[in-house]
Image (cartoon, helix red, strand yellow):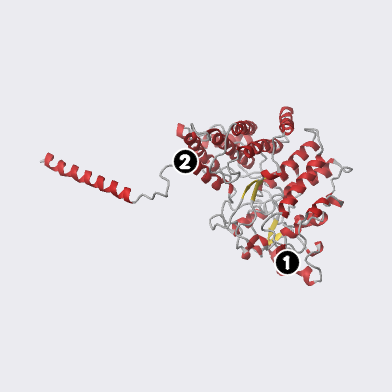
Amino acid sequence: MKKLFYIPLAIIVMSVASSCKKFDELNTNPDVPTTVTPELISAQLMKDVYRFWNVNPTDFGSGNLWAKHTAMLETNPNPGQYYYSYYPYGSFGGFQKLTNLKRMVELATGNPTESSYKGLALFMKASAGFNMVTDMGDIPYSDAGKAEEGNTTPKYDKSADVFAAILNDLKAAEEAFATGVTFGGDLMYGGNPVKWRRLCNAMQLKVLQTISKKITTEQKARFAAIVAAGNLLTEADNFQLVYTENTNASHPFFNGENRRIVIGVAKQVVDFLKLNNDRRLFYFAEPAPYKITGGLLENDYNAYEGAPTELSADQLALNRAAGKYSLINKRYVALRSGDPKLEFTYAEQCFIIAEAIEEGWLSGSAQTYYENGVKAILKYYMTLPSATPANLHGMAITQSYIDGYFTGEAAYKTAGTKADRLQQIITQRWLLDFFQGNSLFSYKTFLRTGLPAFPLNSATSMNPDDPAVYPKRWKYPPSELTTNETNYNQAVTDQFGGFDGINKVPWYLQ
């Protein structure tokens, strides 16, 4: 009886399997790829890493508050403006992508593009680690991405060792790109290995400057050697994500008019631009309504007034209702493609080198680098497709304006003090991030240098541990307490006396 039962069952199974196979064959879309390629992995990873984290006008508006570029003019205080956060924890999410980076390189093995993908994987790991170590402190860098090997409780490396490993990975990435060829799936540089090499070198300069309080003589020499070698970013090499008219690739603030009317340009942005007769003011802002009703014209610098970011939310909302502040320029909501998201520019590279020269790390003209950086970003705004004449208040940036920019307060203070010149360099660098949605690094630069001075009012600060100080870091992800408790506790004890707090000072700021 058992044999009689199994024979028809086997026939049924075979028939079903055959039918399923035919169904799959009939329903296979020839236009949909059935295998993963390194290009597909690269494109997805870049989209995940470089686009704004949550593509909507509300969150994009909040994403610009930490660097004091803008102020929310609503009665409900936004923690990002008042030195706290809705979620005061960092993330190790970037390291979850290491497995996909590994797959990307494996799929390119034996292909002419293999070296380029190796370079990309190293760069993306280094970049993720750089963000995490400056966000939180010691992190699991050397053990990251080893879950497949059975290591699910990675040890935390000391910050000094993490920075050294990041620099080594960036150097290795540059060497890989040096032997690489054009590769697919690159949303930033179109697969150009020459541009990636330059970026890897420039990124090393940025990392080295970030540890300026701890930098060694050997590391200063490394900085100088990279500059002397000359294989760095040019004006044509801005590392940027370009938004498009495609509905799936729109600028996050497109069509955000109901958010624009409650976002003011910060007072220290407006004041600096006015002091320097800088026409970026007319690209960033709208005139304050009460200045216009008072008789001033929209092309008058005095028609613009910034919002003090440290005022209470209630007072800011009342002043907005009275027309006392300059709101974000209307052009930011007008075009679906908007402005590109600037990740690393030639201008920033210039300011990094200018600061290093002022600090004595290498010889050269800090003034030349300062002026080249300013001219580059002014030229960038001059050629932006989103900067249409209708939104520039009759004060468009022109080449003749750029040529005459360095007068008065904008002139490099060669006769002033080193502190005066660093104030100019770092403030200009700070402005590069204006309304980019990636203001956290500007905040970290402020923590490192104190420049430009950010206002702090203990009466409005939302810092829960001490409203009289600036937060220095994000706390470690709460999941570490359950998934990696021993290593987490050791890291917090070694660095911060056992308290994982936002006001604790990470190694690079000590």
Where residue 279 sits in the image (x, y, percent)?
78, 57
Where in the figure is residue 338, as x and y percent of width and height? Answer: 63, 57
Give left or right: position of 293 versus 317.
right
Q: Amino acid at mark 1?
A: Asn
Q: Amino acid at mark 2?
A: Thr
Q: Is residue 489 above or below residue 394?
A: above
**Which residue is pictured at 55% across the width and 34% down the height?**
118
Whole-percent x, y for residue 500 in the image: 60, 41
Q: Quadrant of residue 70?
A: bottom right
Name the outermost residue toward the left. Answer: 1
- Quadrant in which the N terminus is drawn: top left
Residue position for label 2: 37
| Residue 175 seen anywhere in this rendered image of the structure | yes
Viewer can see residue 451 = no
First of labels 1, 2 by sequence position:
2
User: Residue at label 1?
Assistant: 319
Specify few, some or many for label 2: CA neighbours under 10 Å numbering under 14, 14-19, or 20 or more: some
Q: Residues within 10 Å of mark 1 (few under 14, many from 20)?
A: some
Quadrant position of the C terminus in the picture: top right
> Toward the viewer: 354 or 62?
354
Front residue of 360 and 161: 360
Q: Between marks 1 and 2, how big is the CA–CA gap? A: 55 Å
Figure quadrant of residue 393: bottom right
- For label 2, the SS is loop
